[in-house]
Image (cartoon, grey):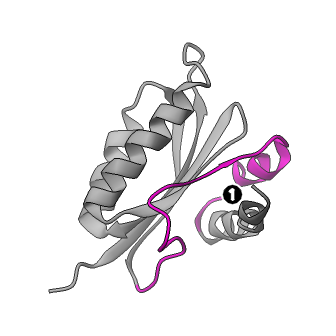
Amino acid sequence: MKHLLGCFLYHSEIASDASTSCVADITRVSRRFNEAHGITGILIFDGQRFVQYMEGPQQQVIALAKKISLDNRHTNFTPQHEARGITSRLFSGWTMAYLSVDDAEPLAQMWVVDGDAAMSCLQQLLPMLDAA
């Protein structure tokens, strides 16, 4: 039986007592975990704010989102989009793509939208992957 796919998008802020160096550890650990659990996605960080999109087996994605929501390295965890029963992945080749953006504007736009509008903002950021 094929697993039903789901996706989850959220944004958060780095905790005031967390160093930005923790992002490298988050990315390294996430890549290993995601590979073992069939999850793909992207983490975007602008020095203050995170946006993360993950996709994979529905139950795995839901469990991971809950685990991430409890991580004390960030605050203001805000779900923006969740879908169940998706048929294709945006990041099929990336266990965890990482994009660091110097300009805060792209992520600022994502903080004021949710649902399909948040997904649209995410997709507008994707060409930046080619430049990274």
On the rendered structure, is 94 left or right of 51? left
- Which of the 4 image quadrants contains residue 82? bottom left
Q: Residue at x 31, y 49 (%)?
A: 33
Res. 67 visible in picture = yes
Q: Residue 50 in the image: state x and y as whole percent.
A: 61, 41
**How many marks overall?**
1
Q: Residue 99 in magenta? A: yes
Q: Residue at x 52, y 27 (%)?
A: 22
Residue 64 vertical placement versus 123 (above, below): above
On the rendered structure, is 97 left or right of 129? left
Residue bearing mark 1:
113
Q: Residue 59 in the image: state x and y as whole percent.
A: 24, 63
Res. 80 visible in picture = no
Q: Residue 43 in magenta? A: no
Q: Residue at x 34, y 49 (%)?
A: 32
Q: Give the magenta range.
A: 87-115
Q: Residue at x 40, y 31 (%)?
A: 71
What element does badge 1 sit on? loop
Q: Residue furthest top?
A: 17
Residue 74 vertical placement versus 128 (above, below): above
Where does the N terminus fall, quadrant-wise? Answer: bottom left
Where does the C terminus fall, quadrant-wise? Answer: bottom right
Name which residue type carries label 1.
Answer: Val
- Which of the 4 image quadrants contains residue 38? bottom left
On the rendered structure, is 81 left or right of 122? left
Q: Residue 117 in the image: state x and y as whole percent.
A: 68, 68
Q: Main secondary structure of the magenta part?
A: loop
Residue 71 vertical placement versus 44 (above, below): above
Q: Residue 56 in the image: state x and y as whole percent.
A: 36, 69
